[in-house]
Image: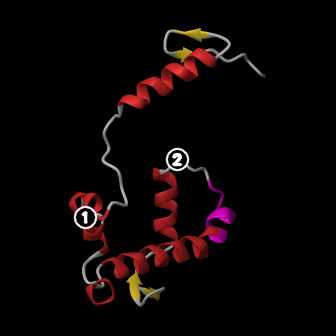
Amino acid sequence: METLGAQTPIAFGIEDLRETAALARLNLSEEEINASLGAFSEMLSYFAAMQEADSDTAAFGKNLSEVHDERFAAASGHFRPDEPHPQDVRTAEKILSLAAETDGRFIVMPNVL
């Protein structure tokens, strides 16, 4: 086991990378796997650092995952409620009226290839 990034131990070796590549259906050569191991380990260390920052209540007053709670988002005014608005329908109708050709609620585009 080696320590990467924010002092978070990550046990990840070449066999783990081979298995991950196979699960992702990536046909990597041995050369590509060997060349990718360092970058993949570095990426995992960034994820570990983000996870560590998320749980650092001293830095943020609470876990970052709690900051984006819906109640907080609505109260802060930074996020709009995820609800359809009447103008959305009018906007779609206006866009469709401007299209050269439509098929129901779809815009017909010419083939370019």
Q: Position of residue 25 (x, y in %)?
A: 52, 47
Q: How is the image coloured?
A: secondary structure
Q: How many marks?
A: 2
Q: Secondary structure at mark 1?
A: helix
- Residue holding disc 1: 72
Magenta-drawn segment: 28-35
Amino acid type at image mark 2? Arg
- Residue 101 included in the magenta stretch of the image: no
Mark 2 Cα-neighbour bin, 10 Å: few <14, some 14–19, many ≥20 = few
Q: Dots 2 and 1: beta carbons under 8 Å?
A: no
Q: Which residue is mark 2?
A: 25
Please name the predominant secondary structure of the magenta segment in the image: helix
Query: Is residue 43 left or right of 29 when viewed as pictured?
Result: left
Q: Nearer the viewer, mark 2 or mark 1?
A: 1
Dot 2 or dot 1: first in sequence order is: 2
Image location (x, y in percent) of residue 61: 26, 84
Label 2 to label 1, Cα distance in Å?
40 Å
The residue at 55%/70% (across/down) is 40
Quadrant the N terminus occupies: bottom left
Relative to 82, is 14 on the left or the right?
Answer: right
Q: Label 1 is placed on what type of residue?
A: Phe
Residue 106 in percent (x, y) is at 53, 16
**In this picture, residue 74 sits left or right of residue 97:** left
Camera-side residue of 97 and 105: 97
Residue at 28%, 70% in the rendered image: 67
- Going 25% across and 64% down the picture, which residue do you hit? 72
Quarter of the picture containing the C terminus is top right
Vertical position of residue 38 compared to residue 30: above or below: below
Seen in the image, is 21 located left or right of residue 71?
right
Residue drawn at x 44%, y 87% is 6
